[in-house]
Structures are given as structure tokens and as C-alpha cells.
Amino acid sequence: MTQDRPGGADTVDRAVTGDERQESTGTVIVAGLANLAIAAAKLVAGLLSGSAAMLSEAAHSFADTLTEVFLFVSLRRGARPPDEKHPFGHGKSSYIWATLGAFATLFLGAGFAITEGVHAILTNEQTGDYLVSYVVLAIAFVLEGTSLLRALSQLRRSARRWRVPILRYLRRTPDTAVKAVTFEDSAALVGLALAAAGLGLTELTGDPLWDGVASIAIGALLAVIAIQLVRANVSLIVGEAPPPRLRDEIVAELERLPEVERVLEMLTMYLGPDSLLVAARVAFVGPVDRLTAAADEAERRLRARFPLIRYVFLDPTPRPARVGPPIHPRPEDGGASKV
């Protein structure tokens, strides 16, 4: 009972997820172009001033640019339709490419920044004029802030659509593209502040130690962000389920049908940023000839209310007592359903 059909809930599903995918692509492109321009400016400023923090910020922006390339590829490849070899689509390939982008941030950005910072502290070389660096940092702050505002705007709209707080949505969304852009742009603004602090303290004290410390701090920040993104992507590749609240709402929607006595077991898994699989064992009541119609109605309701759901598999089980207690005990069973 999972074939895509024209019209109805499937039309709603594709319209909503298609808009979100296009918005994520635009967010990635804007962030990538901004990072490329900023990286070039930081590199020039770093070479002119000899600042380790500025060179680390240049590596940071170049790594972010490479990450945006991986994210763009992930969106394009993940959006390919199902085929005979991949009947559930190519959505999980998005997470593989996003993971490669996170590794780029970890090794190219964090690795270079920490290495450059340690080298600056050990050599204790005097740096040059910082005026160009301050100007570049100010311009970069405006560009990175613009990119972050776009990502936050998308997050707010998506969180409002799912009726959840923005931080909860950011933590649990399967859209790793917008999550990566938000994390990286936030880290970029913090990195700019660290670089400015390192330059200011070095200029004020005359000790290049602060420049190296700022560079190491930037590297540590990038490492934390990259590791968090790798963990999130690996979890989705393995087969992460949606949050308990969404699973509870799916169960409640199924149990609203008069033909459904209760949901005995339900398995869910993200198949991609805009695709969710639902498989449930359901205790049906009523005549056998109503099973097909009831199952079709259950699928229609789920796909209409939750556009993320792309596949629904329902297994009717006539004797619930043999398969264990229900997921949500009903009041007459001594419990209450929690949604």
C-alpha cells in the first residue's frame, strides 16, 4: 500500500518537500559564494599581515566553500527519483556527501588552524600591519551574517510548519544542508570574533602569542562543529527514526480510524531529507472486506497530515493479545495515550 499515486496527498507531499529542497539549495549557493569571496579576502589580509589567525580564517572559509560544494552535490544527487536499483530513492546519498563536507571542515579547516596556531606560538614571529585584516574581518562579518540570516529564516519557516521551537527543529531535522549552513555560519561569526580578539591583543601587547592562541581556538571550534555534523549524518545513514513526538502523532492519527483498534508496533526511518518510511502492525476491527479500504484511508490521512511521509506499510493483525501490549494503552486498559 505504498505506491505513489497522482493527486491527493501525494501532490501535497511533493509540493511541500520540493519547496523545501529548492530553498535549501538556494541557502547553500548563497553561503558558498559568500565563503569563496571571504576566503580570498582573508588570504590576502593574512599574507600581508602575517597573522596566523587570519590565515586560519582563510582556511576556514575555503573549507566552508568546499563543504558547500559537497552539500550542493548532496542535494542534487539525493533528489534523484527512485529507480529499479534504488526503489526507495537516493535520499541517503545526501547524508554521505554531507559527511564528506564535514570531514573537509575537520581536516582542512580545523587541522590547518590548529597547526598554524601552534607554529605561530613556537616561532614567536612578529606580525605586520593589521589595518587590512580589520577591514576584511568587518566585511566578512556582514557577509557571513547575511548568509546566517537566510539560513535562520528558512529554519523559522520550517519550524513553524512543524509547530516546534526553532532549536528543537535544528537539532532533529533530517535536512543536513540547512543544518550544516547554520552551524558553519554561526561558527564563522564566532571565528571572526576570535580572530579580531587575537589581532587586537597581539597589537596591544606586542606579543604574537595571542595571535597563535586565537588560531588554535578557531581550529578547536571548527573541530567541534565538524564532529557534531559527522555524528548527525552517520546516524541518518544508519537509519535514524524521527523524534518521539512525531511518532506519537502518527500512532494517534492511525488510531483515530474507527477500523483501527490499536497500533501494535511501528517502525519509522528517514530515507532522506524529505522522505520518511512508516511500517506498522495494526489491529483492525470489522469485516475483512473493509481492510483494504481502511488501510488506504489510513495511508491517505498520514500522507495528508505529514508531508514528509513518502512510504506507508500497514500489516493487519487480527489477534493483538498474541503480539504483546499496544504502543499506547487506552484508558479502558488502565493507561492513557500520550501525544
Image (cartoon, rainbow, N blue to C red):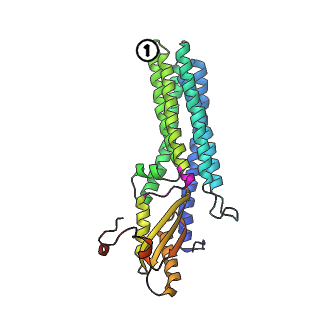
Residue 146 seen in the figure: no
Name the one closer to the observer, 38 or 257: 257
Q: Mark 1 falls on what kind of element?
A: helix
Q: Residues within 10 Å of mark 1 (few under 14, many from 20)?
A: few
Quadrant of the image containing the N terminus: bottom right
- For disc 1, the marked residue is 204
Q: Is residue 111 above or below residue 313?
A: above
Name the one closer to the observer, 266 or 3: 266
Q: Is residue 42 left or right of residue 266?
A: right
**Residue 96 placed where, x, y %?**
61, 48
Identity of the residue drawn at 44% across and 59% down: 161
Q: Is residue 275 above or below residue 28?
A: below
Identity of the residue drawn at 33% across and 72% down: 330
Q: Furthest-right residue in view? A: 84
Q: Is residue 288 above or below residue 210?
A: below
Q: Which of the 4 quarters of the picture holds residue 262?
A: bottom left
Q: Which residues are magenta?
A: 235-243
Q: Is residue 69 left or right of residue 185?
A: right
Identity of the residue drawn at 43% across and 55% down: 159
**Residue 210 placed where, x, y %?**
47, 19
